[in-house]
Amino acid sequence: MMRSEQEHRDKNHIGRAQILRCYFASGGLFFINGYMERLKDSFHVIGKYLSFLMILWVWHIIWGMVPDAVLGGGLYNHANLVWYIAITECIIFCGGHLFYDAYMDIKSGAIEQMLMRPVSYQFRAFAQWYGKALGQATVFFPMALLSAYFITGEWVMDTGRVALAAVMTMGALFCVVSMNYMVALTALWIREAAPAYWIVQKLCFLLGGLLFPITLYPEMFYDIAKFLPFAAVFFFPGTMALNVLPFGAGALIAIEVFWMFALYGLSVLIHGCALRHIGKYGA
């Protein structure tokens, strides 16, 4: 009897392990699919890059008209700020509008069938969207840094800071995926995802330092904003191009990792609310 129970437990353990391996293998396939989808869509990348280049050039002209002595109290020069924008805009260009696929699933009602599949809809969406974001960043990130160099004529980051900026950009894109997923699910309650998307985007602009460092804000405002998720997504990676960091490198990574887990956890909670809503009212 004891042997039979032990064999039963062993079989259950092996079965759970196999299911878990299949689950993560499917996630890996969705990730690779999203990654390759972005790499093969060369016209999409080129179009985005030309828009990015125009934005970078405009801000190069704007910051070039401001004397370096008054930029951040003399802490930055105009080249630092152009490089900063190159990193932050790279993140928004690689991670923007990922929510649209899930939004269309909700609008069409297809999400009800997709929720019945063995692999979690959220898990599949996260894997595919993060693959798309990293696939584009693989090309976009080095192009962004080279563009900043050719526009300003200065290389303002050493190898260590470039590597840290790349790592923090990957973390930032994970946060952006979480935000996109939550934005998409708002369509269940208000029928459109665009209002939530524009609100989040404006918060990124205002509190995240999308186009200029939040260190240029009044000190009290800055002291609050630097601990918010929007700063972790844009300001922290962008500060690798500045002469002064808000925290040490370890603290920057720790805060960003905290927000990666916090935003993902919040997306799981909203996903649960969405499931209950669909179960009661449908999509």
Image: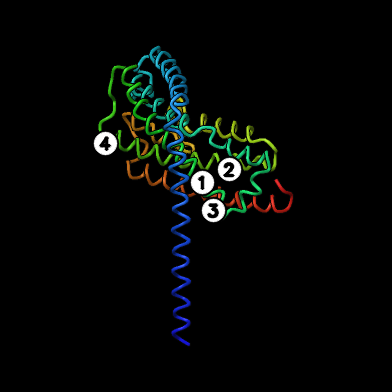
Which amino acid type is shown beneath numbered disc 2? Answer: Met
Q: Are marks 1 and 4 in contact (CB under 8 Å)?
A: no
Residue under pointer 4:
160
In this rendering, the label closer to the viewer, 4 or 2: 2
SS at badge 4: helix
In this rendering, the label closer to the viewer, 1 or 2: 2
Which amino acid type is shown beneath numbered disc 3? Answer: Val
Q: Position of residue 88 (x, y in %)?
A: 43, 30
SS at badge 3: loop
Residue 169: tell me if it is visible.
yes
Residue 78, quarter of picture: top left
Q: Position of residue 203 (x, y in %)?
A: 54, 33
User: Of callouts 3 and 4, which one flags the residue occurring earlier in the amino acid sequence?
Assistant: 3
Which amino acid type is shown beneath numbered disc 1? Answer: Leu
Residue under pointer 2:
182
The residue shown at (41%, 36%) is: 135
Label annotation for residue 119: 3
Q: Are marks 1 and 2 in contact (CB under 8 Å)?
A: yes
Q: Are marks 3 and 4 in contact (CB under 8 Å)?
A: no
